Amino acid sequence: MSHFKETVCQEYFFSYQDDDSGDEEDSDEKIIRELTEHGIKYESKITNNEELIKNLREQLERLNEIKLSDEEWREIYSKLTNKSREEKLEVIHRNRWMIDSLRLKSGGIKNIHLLDLQNIEKNAFQFIKQFPDKDNSFSNEVTILINGLPLIQIELVDKNISIKAAFNKKIKNIYIPSSKLFEYIQIFIISNGKETKYYSSTNRPDINTKSRNASFEFTIYWSDQANEKIKVFSDFSVHFLNPEVLYSMLTKYSLLNAQNELLVLRPYQICATEKILKKIHSSIIRGLKTSKETGGYIWHSTGSGKTLTSFKASQLAKDIEQVDQVIFVVDRRELNKQIIDEFEKYEKGSTNAINNTQDLLEKLLQENDEKIIVTTIQRLTRLIKEAKSANDKQSKKTITSEKHEKYEKLLSRFEDKRFVLIFDECHRSQAGRMREAIIETFKNSHLFGFTGTPIFHNQKDPKKVNKSSTENLFGKELHRYSIDDAIKDGNVLKFTVDYLHAKIINLSDDSKKSTINQDPTYKHPKKITAIAKYILDNFDRVTCRGQEQSIAAKRRIGFNSIFATDSIESAKAYYLEFKKQQEGKKEPLIITTIFSNSCEKEEIDESKDLPPTSKLSIKNKDFLKEVIEDYNQTFKTSFKIDKFDNFQYDVSERLKNKEIDMLIVVNMFLTGFDSKTLNTIWIDKNVEMHNLVQAFSRTNRILDAAKPAGNVVCFRHNAEKNVAKAFKIYLKDSKKSKDRFLSVLSDYPAVYERYKSSAYKLNEIMVDVIEEPSAFIEQCHELWEAKSILRGFDEFKEAEKIIDDQKEKQLKKYYLALMETETTINTPKPENKKSSPEENELDFVVEYLKQEEIDFKYLNNLMEEWSEQEREGEVNKVWEKIEDLLDYSINLKDFKGYIISYRDAVRAGIAPVKFKKWVKKQIDQDANRVANKEGLDEAYLQEIILVWIKNKNFDLSGGKIDRLLIKPMSRQAEFRQERREKIERIIRELFELFNKYYFIFEDEDFPEEE
């Protein structure tokens, strides 16, 4: 067996090369030299589309060992280019780099390979520079071709411009490449010399759909195995831009999921995958039987993409010739469906659905099954137990001879065949015992564990073996990517933690304080009342929801939360208290609760694979039925307790979609549940060590710049001690310093100091903003970024604000006015100046200002109030309020003209009373203007624009362009360029229209037809 070559280098040493030196020509010569040294050939002659196509033909003929006739080539080229970008991705990832069923002139059929997947040496690596774009202008970009097909694009930006600013500038535009072949690009790389990142081609807009999810947060640094980032381009090119790494990235470490999103793995994910594969290979070579030597564990932080890593490891392990089957094991049934759903998103049909032990038995007996088996540890343990007891006298009486034979065959397979078992988080005591039973059964296999919070040996007595430790169960740590690594890389967020035990006691009735403090179960009714009131009073602040907003708009712009309690009894008490305190509210928060067998106090033998609510007490079952009935009334559903799994799945989906504002739990949803829209966990229970880190980590998934941290609010007196103890264990650095904790926890005094400093500077600058526009903008960014973090702390109330709401409105007014002038934003920077902060941070500011925005419903009410008073001839001061909004609202910046037009129309007596009908009329007029100009179906255009606005999604997929065109355009070769130019023009016009009206009309706000 050949030596296993790793994609990620073991250790990186900074080269100290100066990538700032020289002019652009020197830079061009440098990249040509570097790529050539890595074995990638420079093709200087390819400077236009004709030469690109000619080279592609030559390379495919060479690779496929065929001389194509012109007719055959036209068919191949047509099959390559007459596809959408999504279809081109499918050619690569679902059709395995192949154009199939080419009809040869000789009468035969041949599949044309775009890449040799067996021998890298047979593939030609080339690169071209400054290929002209659609306007025949040249950009400073390098394209790497493999067998003539453009697959990697390197975007080189000025050394004085941050790559974040350059990226944000690019995603504001729809990506329309100069050649249809460029739609095959899989990976983009962006660099200014000092900083370099890569990202998937679907993390940017295309001509069919303008994704609002394209975000710099999803760009990736390359690194070494110790997670040391490789930023400098000259070093990046050595470790990434060489044929071996590029080949692995394209063929092994990229995948197209069910939503047609191209996922490119991060270096730590690749490293973990390869450590597992290397361990399997070395064990096979050494002829080892199942032991700690044949496995190990991966310590990757929660939120770092463990599911994708484990899927890719499972998929590649399955491809090893000596491996017979891969089993992915989760620790409870609620994660089983979640993992299967995720795996199926990565590759449809990649897993076997297991509904019971009989299903599992049949799948494990299948020979040459290419699919990954996903099952719970309880189900697998139960099957092993049944198989081993098949020879018992009692069992022989109850099972058929056919089943007895199957059990015998299964145990034989477990002993002789090579299985790879990959375990997701399994750290409860019973899971440890069940895993031991599995280890004893699989004699010739490999066991790997994935965890964000490993359990260690006794810290006080290292010689004392902890049988439940992760190392004792799986073997040695194979790779580590700890929570501080993930935060440092920007893959997950820091936490803000508030400790409010003392405050809650003070909120309660004075005469009851001593009783509450002494209550060992923390279930005193006064405390529950006080905590519920505190959460309702502070919910909008902590979940970053606006003030003057409808509940629908609050859900859209803000986040939601989980409330962790210590028992079913507590969950019930809080559920009823929230219900009571929200009685009569016009727009109450949607709060529900969920619990199952695992939340009961008594230990349950989970290896029996019992129904999830079978061990609940009658009282708890009855209460859960009431909760489900409330839920059904809220969401117009019809769930029953005997179909608990369906109820749980629906709760999970609605929580992810922000339809539920807060979910009260005991144990469920505190591990394994991932939702980017959840930013807060309220905790009234004692959580420690790995359970604490797991619970906190529900909140810190990255979404966008509007979510600066995961918020944690603790109501127990021992919470601060537990936090310090847990992070002491789970941070990478073992030094006992406060700075280490600040790597994961936001520090209120430090952030408040930043806020205070910026506030004082702004007070000085505001005296003459025009003289210091750049300084003003920079301090606004600093102030708003600090404030977005401070909102997660209870300490930051009105008394702590140095800039009050009125002055903040004035700041926004000045800020937007400066942005309108574009004098500071677009002025070219001198060579010796760094890029200005507004370039780097504009995306954050836009998201921050949107959180503070008024919504359309509020604006509509104001406009109608003004309109009625205006018509009645009353003294009308509402317009002053509207003018104030126009000055500081980012949403209304592009809408100002329509509001002024409506005012003038009302005063002229020619506008309807309903403002939203006026807006609908403007949308129709704008749509008709574009339709008349471009020859489009007016009615259909009006219809789909309203759908786009309602769904907040610009979508032209599914042949909408052809349906819009009244007169179909020819697809023949001589008209192809004309058709392309017209479609590009239409798309731009429609996208401008969508952006103009994007913020209006929540579902209930569509105007009624007259």
Image (cartoon, helix red, strand yellow):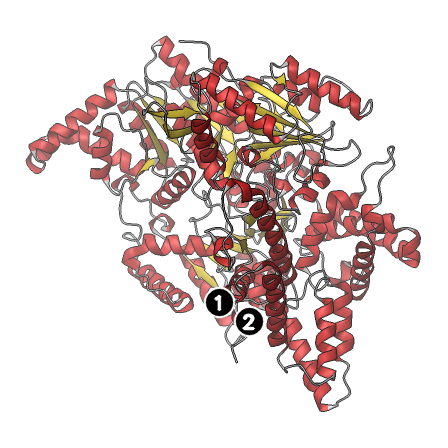
Q: How many marks?
A: 2
Q: Which is more N-terminal, label 1 or label 2?
A: 1
Pick the front one: 266 or 903 = 903
Name which residue lies at 81% across and 48% down: 825
One can see residue 310 in this view: no
Residue assigned mark 2: 1005
One can see residue 440 in this view: yes
Pick the front one: 557 or 386 = 557
Pick the front one: 687 or 366 = 366
Residue assigned mark 1: 577
Q: Secondary structure at mark 1?
A: helix
Name which residue lies at 63% across and 70% down: 922
Q: CA distance from mark 2 to mark 1?
A: 32 Å
Name which residue lies at 6% across and 35% down: 397
Locate the N terminus by quadrant.
top left
> Measured along the vertical axis of the image, is residue 31 above or below residue 570?
above
